[in-house]
Image (cartoon, coloured by chain):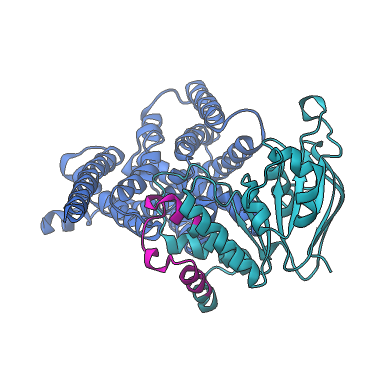
Chain colours: A cyan, B blue
Amino acid sequence: MSLIACKNASFGYEGNAVIGNLDFEINPGDYLCIVGENGSGKSTLIKGLLGLKTAVGGNVFISKEFCLNQTGYLPQQTAAQKDFPASVYEAVISGRLGQRGFLPFYSRKDKYAAQENMRSLNIWDLRNKCYAELSGGQQRRTLLARALCAAGKLLLLDEPASGLDPTATREMYGLIKTLNAGGMSIIMVSHDINAALKCASHILHLQKCGAAQNLNCQNTQAFFGKTQDYIKSSVAADFTGGKIYD
Amino acid sequence: MIDTLSEMFSYAFIVRAFIVGLLISLCSSLLGVSLVLKRYSMIGDGLSHVGFGALAVAAALSAAPLSVAVPAVVVAAFVLLRISENTKIKGDAAIALISTSSLAIGVAVVSLTTGMNTDVCNYMFGSILAMSKSDVNLSAALAVCVLILFVVFYNKIFAVTFDETFARATGVKTGIYNMLIAFLTAITIALGMRMMGALLISSLIIFPALTAMRVFKKFKSVTICAAIISVICFFAGIVCSYLYATPAGASVVIINIAAFLLFSAAGFARRRFRSKTFFKRGQI
């Protein structure tokens, strides 16, 4: 039973498909990495999977046991509001809100979950610090902890390592790998093809469609399948210039 | 000092104005934290101009002022929210559009009916005498509702303010909470503008939040501090207004400016002190 399955699905803006004819599925425990050049619609696809956009065409099946309120989402690095007064703890526990429905306050269980996630990501000591004053890596970890608070079975990560230095990047990918080993399914968008090939179990490669101004794109899915098969494919050879580092 | 206070509160109209003003400044400072951080500071200003237009129309129809102003401002708040979300007109332009239109309509209606008199002056700059007994009851009831709703939905309001996309992605109904914020703001402004004046009411929303943010760095402490600052400034402003016979609204704003400068200095000093100690530790 797959968590999410796309059958011939298209996503885009104002009825106009930017990514078209997607066919892929995610099973529990999978680690799917979405790769592709800039503007190929990776972030649009993430928004579609999150339900922030409805599919323009085709079908997206989401399994019943897992509904929207159980997806953790790590947004792309935005220019964090520089003067936003929020402590790390306040930011992390806000991940639990989706599961609260209309209930107003956090329960003891919510607080415990927030604490567990902060401890596992080593930011418990920072809990009273102001989010805006943290370093880039600490901010990413805070947002990952928030995503974990919201996640039941699936994490969607949009460029988890963007803006991080090499050490922090390695740590970040290590963390995600650990989470995946613990049974969490992962969908990640990444520019870092080498890291993607090293970590992910499946690859979805999107390509830009040739149509003028990206109007009504079709067949933008260049590859979907296991990582081993991707490495051998011609798509990968074109994308990486034939060089895949270990 | 105590003599002045007891003399001041022997006037029934001052007590009435005081109760309502205290509740309004509490509500506006709480909502202000969220509005300032969402970059919606000017919404307060726009809505108060709509309120002015509504009051002018109410006076022309000789209807009860608040029963016209509250619904008009609430509708305007929803329209503003919709416009800035959906269409091609950007939020700030939409606010300017709506506020100047209703100001123009208000001025035209006033000059066609009663003419420019002290009533109009009171709408613009506020008057402590403007509150009738029924106004006070209505204002107090609505202000208490705003307070309760804010406390109940505090966590949601934080989530929607901090990261709306994430909140929506995890299943929080952000549309409802955005509307809630707009609705509460509209009511607060419609209630407060009679005392503070259409031109000054938005300062009650903006100042306490900005002042608190100079020193505090957590959402909860900023919210609590803004509420305390707002209440203290209102109290001091009313006392000043009584002592020096200045308009209530203007006096409260001036005290708020003083508080802002004070907190800015404190925040600056704190940052300096911190970076110095950090530097020393680095040297050792």
Q: Where in the figure is residue B237, as x and y percent of width and height?
A: 24, 46
Quadrant occupied by the N terminus of chain A: bottom right
Whether residue A143 can be seen here: no
Magenta region, residue range: A113-140
Q: Where in the figure is residue A177, as x and y percent of width and height?
A: 61, 64
**In the image, is residue A126 above or below residue B45?**
below
From the viewer's perspective, tell me whether residue A110 is left or right of residue B41. Answer: right
Main SS of residues in magenta: helix
**In the image, is residue A125 above or below residue B111?**
below
Q: Quadrant of residue A210?
A: top right
Q: Where in the figure is residue B30, as x and y percent of width and height?
A: 41, 54
Residue B98 or A59: which is nearer the viewer? A59
Residue B159 or B197: which is nearer the viewer? B159
- Residue at the extreme bottom: A108
Q: Where in the figure is residue B173, as x and y percent of width and height?
A: 64, 56
Residue B198 or A194: which is nearer the viewer? A194
| Residue drawn at (68%, 53%) of the image | A197
Whether residue A121 can be seen here: yes
